[in-house]
Image: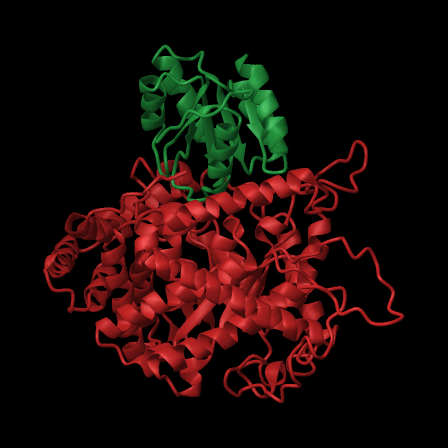
Chain colours: A red, B green
Amino acid sequence: MSAVAKPGARQSQPERRVATPSGIEVPVVVTREMAGGADPELPAAYPFTRGIFADGYRGRPWTIRQYSGFGSAEESNQRYRFLLDQGQTGLSVALDLPTQCGYDPDDPMARPEIGKVGVSLFSLSEMETLFADIDLGAISTSFTINGTAAIIYAMYLAAADKQGVPREKLTGTIQNDILKEYVARGTWIFPVRPSLRLIADSILYSNEVSPRFNAISIAGAHVRDAGCTAVEEMAYTLANGLAYVDELIRRGGDLTRFARRLSFFFYVHMDLFEEAAKFRAGRRLWAKLLRERYGVTDDKALHFRFGVVCGGSSLVAAQPYNNIVRVAIENMAAVLGGAQSIFTCAYDEAFQIPTEFSAEIALRTQQIVQHESGIAATVDPLGGSYYVEWLTDRMEQGMLEVMAEINAYGGVVKAIEDGWLQRRIAVRAKQKKDQTDRGERVVVGQNQFRREAQADSYGEVFRLDPQISARVLAKHAALKRTRDAARVARSLAALEAAAAAAADDRNLMPLLVECCHAYATVGEMVNCLKRCWGEFQEPVRL
Amino acid sequence: MSFALSPGPLAGKRILVAKPGLDGHDSGAKVIALALRDAGAEVIYTGLRKTPEFIVRVALDEDVSAVGLSILSGSHKELAREVLDGLRAAGAGDIPVFVGGTIPPEDAAGLLAAGVKGVFTNDMPLAQMIAELARALA
C-alpha cells in the first residue's frame, strides 16, 4: 500500500514504512478513492459499522464500570458503596483466584492467594455480605468469572432471592467465556467440552429467568493483553463467539433469543485509530457472520454490544503517572469505537491493587471524557474519515484471514485442545517484547525519553490487610459448622447425579442454585463436577 | 517438554520455568522460556498451577541449573519462600532461584534477602536478563 502521489505534494521519506501495531501498512495520506465510495450507511442500520443506536451516546451514555474488589466481602462492600456514592453507574466484581479456580479457602492450593486479586466468595454467605445494603434490583453487576461462572451466577440468583428481588429485574454480566481461559488467563477447571455444556446451561437458563442479564461476555481482552494484535484479538473472539453459537444451537437454544444477550469484552491499547477501527470492523463483521451464516434477521440479535478495559499491558512501571495520559487516549478510542461500557485502569493497576487515590483518577478520567470533551455529542464522529473507513475495511479483511486460518486448522476447539492457539500467542508476545527491546515500539519513559536517575515511584502503595486470609478461613470454618449439613449433602448429591449422566440435555443451573441456597461452597460444587468430568490437561507447546 | 538448541550464552544450561500457585498469566513465562531457548538453554516449562512441592521435585528430577518462578498474583513472597525452603530441605539449596512478574521494588529487596538470586520485571530487556543469568550461572 502506498500513498497516491499527487503533483506538488510533499514526499516525506517515501522509503520509511509506517504500520499500525497489527502490521497494517499506513499510507502517508488516504484519499477518498482509497477509502471506497461515499457510503451513506447510518448508525442502527445493518451492518452497524457506525453503531447500534441511532442516537449513539445521546440516548444512553456508556456505563462507567470500574473493576474492583479485594480481600473479604466486608471490605469490598465498603469500596463498592464508596464508588456508587462517587457516581459510578455499575459494579464490576473482581474475585480472588481460589474462587475463580474452584478451590475453597482451606485448600492448600488456595491459601497463599486468598483475597489477593479479588474478593473471596466461597459461598452465598459471602455474596450476601458483598451486596449488603446494595439493592440488586437497582444496579448492574459484572462478574469477571469464567471457570466457576455458572456457580457464581447461581449464587447471584440466590442472593437476589434472599433480598426479595425478582430475578427478571437483574441486570449485569458474567464473563463465562471459557475458551479464552484456555488460551490466556488460565482459570480453566474442566475439559473443553463439559465446560461448553456448563456455559450453554447458564446462558439458556438466564434467557428464561433473568432475560436482562448477560450470561456471557465473549472476551478478547486477555488474549490481547497476552500479546496478540488488535486484528487477532477480534478474530479469535469472533471465532470463539461462533463456537458458542454452535453449541447453543446444538442444545436447542433459540438463536434470535440468545444472540440478543451475547456481549463482548476487549482491551484498548494505544493506537487510537486502529483501536476505534477495530470495534467498527468487529461490529460489522459479527452482524454479517450471524446474518450470512445463520440467517439471523432480528436487528437486536445482530447487535454487537461490548465493554472494554483501557490499560493493562499498555501501562508501564516506568514513570507511572504517564499512564494516566495513556488511559485517557485509550478511553477516547473506546468511545470512538462505540463501547457500551468502559473500565479505565488506574495508573498503578498493572503493578498493584489500585489505591483509592489512583482509582479516583481513573474514574474522573472517564467523567472528563464523557462530560467535558464533547466526544459523545454525535454518533460515530469518525464515520466518513478517509483513513478510518479505509482502516476499518483493512482490519475486517485481516480478521477474516485469521478466522480462515483457524478454520483451516480445524476450528477453535481443536486449536485450543492441541495448544496451537496458545503457541501462536506466545510467539506474538515474544515478537512484541523483542520490538520493544529494540526500540521499534516506543514506550515513553521506558525505552525512550528516559531521564537519568529516573525514580519510578508509584506513590502510595496499597497493602492488603495481612489478616484477611485468617478472617476468610475463620468465616469458612464457621459456615461449615452452622449450615444445614443434610440440605448441603442432598443438593450436592443431586448435582453430581445429573452431571454424571451420559446425556447433557439436563440443565444443571436449577441444581446449582439449590446448592447455593443450601450454602454449599464453591469448592464442594466444583469437586462434584470434577469427579464427573475430570480436569483440563494443559497442552504445553513452546 | 524440553529442547536443546544452538550454542548461545546459556548453552549447556537446563532451566526450569515454573508457574506456582493459581495465577494464570503465563504470557511472561512463555516469553522468557522462548528467550532462554534462543540463548541456547534447554528449557523445561511446567505449565500453570503447580505447587511449590511439584516444582522442587521437577528441579531435582531434571537436575536443572536454575529455577525461574513467574508470579503475577501478588503471592510472590509466600510462593518463592516455599520453593526456596523446599530446595534447601532437599539438599539442593545451591540451585539458584529467580523470580519474574509484577514485583513491587520494595518486595524485590525482600526476595533477594530471602535467597532469591535475581528479580526480573517485564520492563527489563530480554538481553539484559539473559546476560544477568549467564553471569550468575557461569
Residue A71 appears in the picture as rendered: no
- Vertically, is A210 above or below A356? below
Does residue A161 appear to the left or right of A231 in the view shown? left
Residue A120 screen position, x and y as percent: 39, 50
Residue A86 screen position, x and y as percent: 62, 66
State the image quarter where residue A84 is shown: bottom right
Nearer to me, A232 or B28? A232
How many discs mark residues in the rendered view? Answer: 0
Residue A346 screen position, x and y as percent: 62, 54
Residue lying at 44% horizontally and 86% vertically, measured from the top left: A299
Nearer to me, A162 or A277? A277
State the image quarter where residue A337 is shown: bottom right
Residue B119 appears in the picture as rendered: yes
Residue B8 screen position, x and y as percent: 54, 22
Nearer to me, A239 or B77? A239
Does residue A189 appear to the left or right of A436 in the view shown? left
Residue lying at 32% horizontally and 27% vertically, measured from the top left: B54
Q: Looking at the figure, which quarter contains the N terminus of chain A?
A: bottom right
Residue lying at 47% horizontally and 33% vertically, measured from the top left: B33
